[in-house]
Image: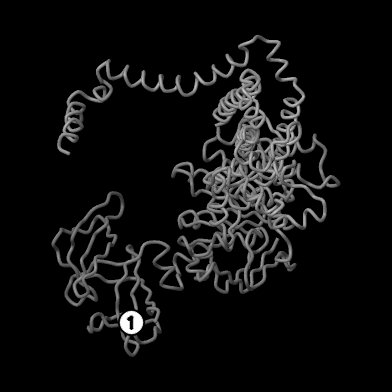
Amino acid sequence: MAGAVAPLARRARASQSAGPRAIRSEPAVVRWLVIGVSLAFLGIFLVLPLVTVFVQAFSRGVMPYLDALTDPDAVAAIRLTLLVAAISVALNLAFGLVAAWSIAKFEFPGKSVLITLIDLPFSVSPVISGLVFVLLFGAQGFFGAWLQAHDIRIIFALPGIVLATLLVTFPFVARELIPLMQEQGTQEEEAAVSLGASGLQTFFRVTLPNVKWALLYGVLLCNARAMGEFGAVAVVSGHIRGETNTMPLHIEILYNEYQFMAAFAVASLLALLALVTLIAKVVLERFVEAER
Amino acid sequence: MKIEIRNVTKTFGDFAALDGVNLDVKSGELVALLGPSGSGKTTLLRIIAGLEWPEQGRVMFDGVDALSRSVRERHVGFVFQHYALFRHMSVFENIAFGLRVRPRARRLPEAEIRERVEKLLDLVQLRWLSDRYPSQLSGGQRQRIALARALAIEPRVLLLDEPFGALDAKVRKGLRRWLRNLHEELPVTSVFVTHDQEEALEVADRVVVMDRGRIEQIGAPADVHDRPQTAFVHEFIGESVVVPITVEGQKVHLLGRPLNLDSQGTADGAARLFVRPYEISVVPPAGAALTGVVKRVHGLGAARRVEVLLCGPDTLVEIDTPRSQSLEVGDTIGLKPQRYRIFADAP
């Protein structure tokens, strides 16, 4: 214990005597070691895998890469992924706005429960998020018999995939908006209404413009997650080729069939999405900075 | 426009924010709601605006019930404590907002909106800021823009919540005078909330003193200052020397010793004697109503501030004496109230 305390005390004394500069006057070796470790970590765990994806994808040249992407099953997977993302982002945009609005602007019983519930998808394993829908709508599930009697397919079909994606991506928009809306309070809305604005005018002219960047940011993250979700979708999709396979599922199947190059080709699209998201995020943050 | 408030009551949970409030505001008048925080003044203002609803009572604008109408329909100009300017709109668009959200049938053509906004910018003397955003303005500028925005809809009533609360002392003084002048130029019925007595007394035609959800006194600034009707008003407005006393059979006693003071018809029991620091004179201690020891003498200018520890009840009071009177720390002196008020303690 004493041994651990001593260096700290010595450093404190040193900084007192030599002024504020002393605190940064670590030996060069230590400085480079610390920077080196973090750079190496970043390289091994982030950059290297990303590079590998693209290297593997183009390992046999451009034509096989394009062939892998234009394979009918791959096209179906890409199309399904885009469709699922479009639906779930649109719905979560609406849900997130409404939830954030009600939490930030009104007092009501059960508010803290709602705030906790919004975070639930973050803390629950995606597999469970998928499984609950199987338990609810699957053949042996709660509503299974009724759904079968009415010939409605949810599990192993588009509705199930959308539901699972919705659940997993629900927090993104709401989480971005709640703290911002809470911080902004209700005064601007009150001002707008006192100036004669209707509820809709207040929303579209005051509330929405005030949160537009946060909203866009939330949508961006929500979209990235919706396209990349694997666990929850894997449970409900049923892996029907050309029908209920999203891109992540398609990649897994290709990989399991030892079609590494094709798997990485499709994966490169997802990686590209990640990069685009990252760049868009940086650009957005610049905008927000500039507006302050 | 005339505002009548009748028996308005509002509670937040167990807390009575307003408790049977009655108030009349005459047309064209500038009224201050003055009180400490939690006195209900802001709640009353928000009820007049329609941002809050009372549980009981009536609010009437020119004899017409206002409570059945929403804030949108009441046509009031509200200036918020922290201005609540629309942060993503330029100063120009902030002021134009009320004109742009009108229903299409009543909306002015763009040229007229422009003209109106520019006139208002001239009124608040900030035309050169028209393209700026709220975050680029100083507190005083924001306040004036908020006022211009509220005036743009030609409100029947102007309501201001702590209009100068967030400004520094110097800007505050200037804006105070400016608001007073503006009201003379544009005599719209106005109510403003403040916790600063100096502000209320200087700006308002009439002052409404509030405490714990009730109105303590309504009157002209000189009235509430010189003729306070309750112990709270005497203590809250201006400075007071306060001495606890008892009244027995119309006689005033200090710790059992009779004082040669008029009980002013106060009921028997515990009471307090209130004197303004400048309405008490120093006399020889022998035979004086109150005696005490000088503890500290300070202050520059015409009057000198003297701290006196009263004998009898150990109470430290501060009085003002003319410079001509020689007083030393440690002197025992007598004190004679020139004008005073006695209020019975609340049971």
Image height check: is B217 above or below A28?
A: below
> Is A148 on the left or on the right of B283, as rendered?
right
Q: Position of residue B272 (x, y in %)?
A: 34, 76
The residue beneath circle 1 is B270
Residue drawn at point x = 30 percent, y = 19 percent: A31
Q: Residue at x 27, y 60 (%)?
A: B321
A217 versus B181 height, above or below: above
Task: Give the x, y percent position of residue B21.
Answer: 58, 71
Image quadrant containing the N terminus of chain A:
top left
Residue at the farthest right position: B105
- Name the residue at 62% across, 61% down: B52
Work out whether residue B183 can be spotted. Answer: no
Q: Residue furthest front?
A: A257
Q: Is residue B250 above or below residue A87?
A: below
The secondary element bearing badge 1 is classed as strand
Can you give x and y, in whole percent of width and height, for residue B108 in the image?
Answer: 81, 41
Res A197 visible:
yes
Residue lying farthest to the left in this orientation: B330
Which quadrant of the view contains residue A3? top left
**Whole-percent x and y of residue B68?**
73, 66
